Amino acid sequence: MNGKLDYWVTGYGTGGTFHGTAKYIKEKIPGTKIILAEPSAANLVGSGIGTKRNADGSPADSHPAFSAHPVQGWTPDFIPYVLETGLGLQDEMVEIPDGAAVGMSQTLARTQGILTGISGGATMWAAIETAKKAPEGSVLVAMLPDTGERYLSTPLFASINADMDEEELSIARSTPSHILEPPPKMSMSVEDKDRIKKAGQGITAFAEGDLQIYDPNVDGKLQGTNDLMNRVKSGASFSAASPKTAEPASIMDRIQGGASFGKPQAESTPSPPVETTNTPESSTSPQQQIPKENERFQRGSYARSGMAE
């Protein structure tokens, strides 16, 4: 290993990279200072408290200095054994304050075109802090071991909107290339919004059993039912009414008995009798008035009880 190296900066996960690299550097370039970084929220090594271990070397408990931190891959809730056996190789400890790792990762992407993860940002933050105190002309090495696309669901990208804003679109349009434009925003008239609102109210009303039907064959009383599909399939028509009354025993029985459904009709003068001939009985049923009512139902002209059409 040739050349000048004044500082080597790293964090730790299991501690393998720190232990192996620091040992090699110390053998080849003894004057190099090893800087070990860890989150301030989990300063396990910096606390000076060791990890209690089981007979096989595994941690017996969570480290008392540990708390949750955003630097994924760094600093578990115990001091790994391979890290512990390498402690003493470091010349200095640097604590990464809360928010510094994410902030540095974003700065690297924005100003240097380096898309690194949160641990990469933490390492760079420690390296910059080390450089501030280093003599002029010093050579520092910091390794950024991961890439930013692994962190799309983490706080690293929480401040970035999924869609481009107007400034970003303006920059994109300035380059002669294929630009995936955002879909146009759809506008809706007041009338359309009102129709959708009424349709939703009507569906809710049927689900709650609030709509009524008028059946002239049941003593002129208002009857209610939740059996919407059976009524539609059988050609029944519907009207809003209030208050809600008892459920009918069987809507199908009433239809089969010749019942018709719709708004009550005003009394009219009886038509003069019409002579009939001995022709087969007409198949015309009282349900001939239904198509008009069905048209109204399809237009969404019925809604919750008590609501005007």
Image: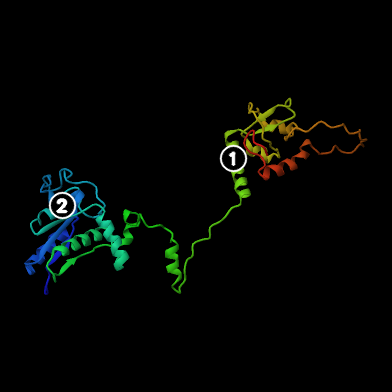
**Image coordinates for residue 60, horizontal then vertical, percent:** 15, 43
Q: CA distance from mark 1 to mark 2?
A: 61 Å
**Image coordinates for residue 242, horizontal then vertical, percent:** 65, 30
Rendered position, 125 above or below 51: below
Q: Which residue is mark 1?
A: 201
Q: Quadrant of residue 229?
A: top right
Residue at left 15%, top 60%? 18
Instruction: Mark 1 and mark 2 in contact? Answer it, CB < 8 Å.
Output: no
Closest to the observer, 281 or 20: 20
Label 2 element class: loop
> Does residue 48 appear left or right of residue 267 in this picture?
left
Q: Residues within 10 Å of mark 2 (few under 14, many from 20)?
A: some
**Image coordinates for residue 179, horizontal then vertical, percent:** 47, 68
Q: Quadrant of the N terminus?
A: bottom left
Closest to the observer, 128 or 152: 128
Q: Amino acid at mark 1?
A: Gln
Residue 96 is marked as none
> Does residue 236 appear left or right of residue 266 in this picture?
left
Closest to the observer, 238 or 183: 183
Residue at left 24%, top 47%? 68
Q: Which residue is mark 2?
A: 80
Q: Amino acid at mark 2?
A: Pro
* Mark 1 vs 2, N-terminal side: 2
Rendered position, 29 above or below 68: below
Looking at this rendering, what residue extends furthest in the top direction? Answer: 219
